[in-house]
Image (cartoon, grey):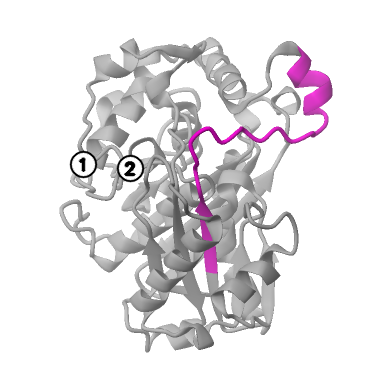
Amino acid sequence: MVKRPKGAIIGIGELQPVRYSEEKTTLSFIAESVQLALQDAGLSKEDIDGLLVGPQVGETPQHVPATVAEYLGLEPSMSNTVDLGGATGAGMIWRAAAAIEAGMCETVVCVLANKNERGNPPRSPNRNPIREFDVPFGASGANTSYALLKRLHMENYGSTQEDFARIAYWARKNARKNPKAIFHDKPVELEDILQSPIISDPLHLLEIVMPCAGGAAVIVTLEEKAEKAKQKPVYLKGAGEKITHRAVSQAPAVDRHPFSYSIPYALNQAGLTGKDLDLLSLYDCYTSVVAVQLESLGICELGQFGSFVRSHTFSHDGDYPLNTHGGQLGFGQADLAGGMSHVIEAVTQLRGEAVGRQIPEAKHALVTGNGATLSETTALVLGGTSS
């Protein structure tokens, strides 16, 4: 077991996602999320001396921490942006704990939010080597790139369309137990997923997250202070992170994707195995991303996630609870804040507050984040006790 940064989550706040935001700013979503987290923790803004934010705040192209701090009325002694795509939320948690352990601050708010306006033009960042090796051949967006990764898994291991569709099916089924989920009242069957339009072969529409608007915030503090917190603390037990590439054309072999490092590293820090976990809160922008994470956990063999998902149940009362809030496929993806929803669900379960979907006696949860095209990955192990 290797040394881990120590910290505890004592406050969470999450907005209910909406398909489109009307006359709302990203800063306003940030403020509302932080206010909810402060109320949950029983703190005031004066108790916050650390701030971690995402790189995308529509109201400012630079000086993001300063802009957010000013808007919130904070004067942090540690602040930074975290830019890991969908891994940003999970990546913030261990960075907050590390800053606390380094003595730079004591209580950090980590916040992500996104507005989603009708007709909002998509971003088109000018990045290389994507511009040189991917875009000229049509791989200019996430759908195309993740389709290539799904196809690679199917060709290498014989996984089927139905295997991947089962992941989306369970996400939507679990979302029915979460009144906050954007697809709470929109159930689907396995056949609905398989018959939904092909967006980028072999990806179906219902295997892909739907962008929406929303926000989420998490407060991390010293373990010693957490013992006196208003809410039951949730402790960071292990963390792992790995970046292997940016453009899908530069990705390593399918058996060397970055989750194959970050997940085992986090489990090693925590002194646990995949079978010791009570909740798998796995980043799920696409079904194929969940598939390779299940294989990285050591609970099924490389290339065999299909037989695994056919043999197990993934609801809160199943044998392998997976994304009990619905995941982003069922809850919604408010840009980078979508990744934070996995952190918040883990905290909610470990507190015993997941009404209608509570895992019995939940003690340990794995939370993951994924950015770019299976490129930037973070894994956290959270626990309900400090020991």
Q: Position of residue 83 (x, y in %)?
A: 67, 52
Can residue 205 be seen in this snapshot? yes
Marks counted in the figure total 2
Q: Position of residue 225 (x, y in %)?
A: 46, 87
The residue sitting at 53% across, 72% down in the picture is 109
Toward the front, the furthest residue is: 23
Labelled disc at residue 322: 2
Mark 1 falls on what kind of element?
loop
**What is the spatial separation of the Cα atoms under label 2 and label 1, in whole angstroms?**
9 Å
The residue sitting at 20% across, 37% down in the picture is 185
Mark 2 falls on what kind of element?
loop
Q: Is residue 122 left or right of residue 251?
A: left
Nearer to us in this view, 110 or 292:
110
Given contact means CB atoms under 8 Å apart, are the residues at marks 2 and 1 in contact? Answer: yes
Q: Position of residue 365 (x, y in %)?
A: 38, 56
Magenta residue span: 110-136
The residue sitting at 74% across, 22% down in the picture is 249
User: Is 9 part of what is drawn in magenta?
Assistant: no
The residue sitting at 31% across, 62% down in the picture is 348
Q: In the displayed structure, would residue 132 be above or below residue 161?
A: below
User: Which residue in the structure is indicated by mark 1?
Assistant: 318
Toward the left, the furthest residue is: 356
Looking at the rendering, which quadrant does residue 197 occupy?
Answer: top left
Q: In the displayed structure, would residue 11 be above or below residue 159?
A: below
Q: Quadrant of the N terminus?
A: bottom right
Say few, some or many: other residues with alpha carbon within 10 Å of mark 2 (under 14 / 14 to 19 / 20 or more): many
Q: Quadrant of the C terminus?
A: bottom left
